Amino acid sequence: HGARTTGRGLLIVFEGCDRSGKTTHCTRLVSELNARFTAQFMRFPDRSTLVGRMIDAYLKGEKELDDHAIHLLFSTNRWEKVDELKRALENGSHVVVDRYAFSGVAFSAAKDGMSMQWCKQPDRGLPRPDLVCFLDVSPDEAQKRGGFGRERYEKLEFQARVRQNYDHLMDDTWQIIQTDHKTMDQVYAEVMAVVERTMQSQINQKPLTPLWP
Ligand code: NYM
């Protein structure tokens, strides 16, 4: 069966500030991976669940919630999908995820009175990604891209704080890809290169480990 994986699939997460191009590149990656393997797309927040609908209302400004409460809903939204995620990986499917626990921490901890340490706790134990593809965009550039400013958090100074928080979450599973002044094809080529490299380094099939030991 050629290039099809025999062991578990890779968990590939995309992170970045708003309007960094994550969704575009995730979608393209999933369809290209599917030509050679089995690959699945997931995104957080998943607005289709009951919890996801509350998150959606909050993001659209239709609902007010305490900062701790919305943080826990974002985390719940991941935990309600963790069985599906693990099953897909165990069945040999690669899973490409548009935002994960890192968004949870980077965004919530950008609010006054919310510490990184407090914010990390509810997501402890989620599967740790094999690769975090960080699409870096400057706040100025993000603002020029379509759709910026529609939802909560889409403000320049807030995004700058989110970007700083990401710096504290990076480890050796992260790859930072600059997107300013690059075409989508140029960015995608870099995405594919880091994905290929991760596939090579995962050839020995390291088991999944939990996030944030
Ligand atoms: N967001 C996303 C959080 O604040 N916490 C989280 O845990 C997650 C997954 O939701 N501004 C924020 C980041 C985005 C917003 O995400 C909606 P998207 O990818 O634009 O649908």
Image (tube, grey):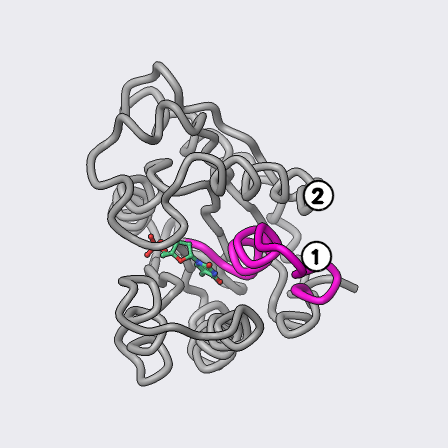
- Judged left or right of residue 181, residue 79 is right
Q: Residue at x 54, y 64 (%)?
A: 7
Residues at marks 2 and 1, CA–CA distance in whole angstroms: 9 Å
Q: Mark 1 points at which residue?
A: 116
Residue 123: percent from left, percent from top: 62, 70
Tags 2 and 1 touching, CB below 8 Å? yes
- Judged left or right of residue 124, residue 74 is left
Over which residues does the magenta segment extend? 99-120
Q: Residue at x 27, y 41 (%)?
A: 24
Residue 132: percent from left, percent from top: 55, 45
Please give the label number shown on residue 168: 2
| SS for dot 1 | helix
Which of these two is toward me, 3 or 96? 96
Q: Which residue is drawn at 49% across and 36% down?
A: 157
Ligand 1 falls in quadrant: bottom left
Residue 176: percent from left, percent from top: 55, 31
Q: In which quarter of the image is residue 47?
A: bottom left
> Magenta stretch containing residue 101, yes or no?
yes
> Magenta stretch containing residue 142, yes or no?
no
